[in-house]
Image (cartoon, rainbow, N blue to C red):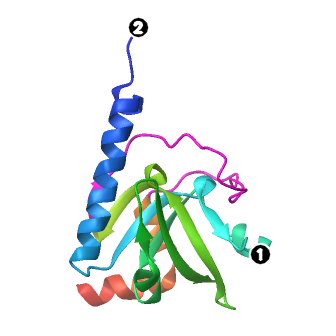
């Protein structure tokens, strides 16, 4: 019987520590970044309105800059920040388990990949998983016209 090494408790602990240390390093360098996360494992407080929730794909990219960056914090289990959503800029605190972060990106460059799966504990209701196909983090990034403008400026 073959063991999937990327799903062992030892590898998950290693990956969780790596994600924590990477985010702490970016904070120490005052460097804004983006995280691609599995939406089913994210907790929004207060819960987002249904029209906003339904607009998310299975994987969502959060650009952690400006106020979101200033409000961000990380501990050994969770990455947390405040953000506004939708046309009304509905404010919510976003709480992401570290192992639900699949990528960390600086601009267009992924600097961290996480292939382990987060096994959900009961931290709240979170957002129900939308029944759509998974998209890559770059597709999620390009799905937002505002992000396209940012990427075009860098070329």
Judging by the rendered image, the residue that carries numbered circle 2 is 1
The C terminus lies in quadrant: bottom left
Examine the rendered structure and indicate whether residue 70 appears above or below residue 2: below
Query: Residue 28: where, in percent of width, then height?
Result: 23, 75
Query: Residue 14: where, in percent of width, then height?
Result: 30, 41
Q: Which residues are magenta?
A: 110-136
* Disc 2, SS: loop
Q: Is residue 121 magenta?
A: yes
Judging by the rendered image, the residue that carries numbered circle 1 is 49
Which one is in front, 1 or 14?
14
Which one is in front, 3 or 78?
78
* Disc 1, SS: loop
The N terminus lies in quadrant: top left
Look at 50% across and 83% down and name the residue there. 145
Examine the rendered structure and indicate whether residue 29 appears above or below residue 104: below
Q: Give left or right: position of 122 versus 5.
A: right
Query: Residue 63: where, in percent of width, then height?
Result: 43, 76
Q: If you read the primary sequence from the N terminus, does the residue marked by circle 1 or circle 2 appear first?
A: 2
Category of crowding for the residue at label 2, using alpha-carbon neighbours closer than 10 angstroms: few (below 14), some (14–19), many (at least 20) = few
Q: Quadrant of residue 64?
A: bottom left
Task: Say whether residue 62 is visible.
Answer: yes
């Amino acid at each position: 019987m073959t063991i999937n090494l990327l799903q062992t408790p030892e590898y998950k602990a290693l990956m969780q520590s790596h994600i924590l240390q990477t985010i702490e390093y970016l904070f120490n360098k005052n460097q804004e970044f983006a995280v691609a996360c599995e939406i089913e494992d994210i907790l929004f407080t207060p819960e987002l309105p249904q029209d906003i929730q339904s607009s998310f794909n299975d994987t969502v990219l959060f650009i952690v800059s400006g106020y979101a960056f200033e409000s961000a914090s990380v501990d050994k289990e969770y990455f947390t920040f405040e953000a506004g959503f939708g046309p009304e800029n509905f404010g919510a605190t976003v709480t992401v388990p570290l192992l639900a972060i699949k990528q960390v990106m600086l601009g267009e460059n992924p600097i961290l990949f996480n292939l382990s799966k987060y096994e959900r504990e009961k931290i709240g209701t979170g957002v129900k998983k939308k029944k759509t196909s998974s998209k890559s983090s770059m597709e999620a990034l390009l799905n937002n016209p505002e992000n396209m403008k940012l990427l075009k400026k860098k070329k």
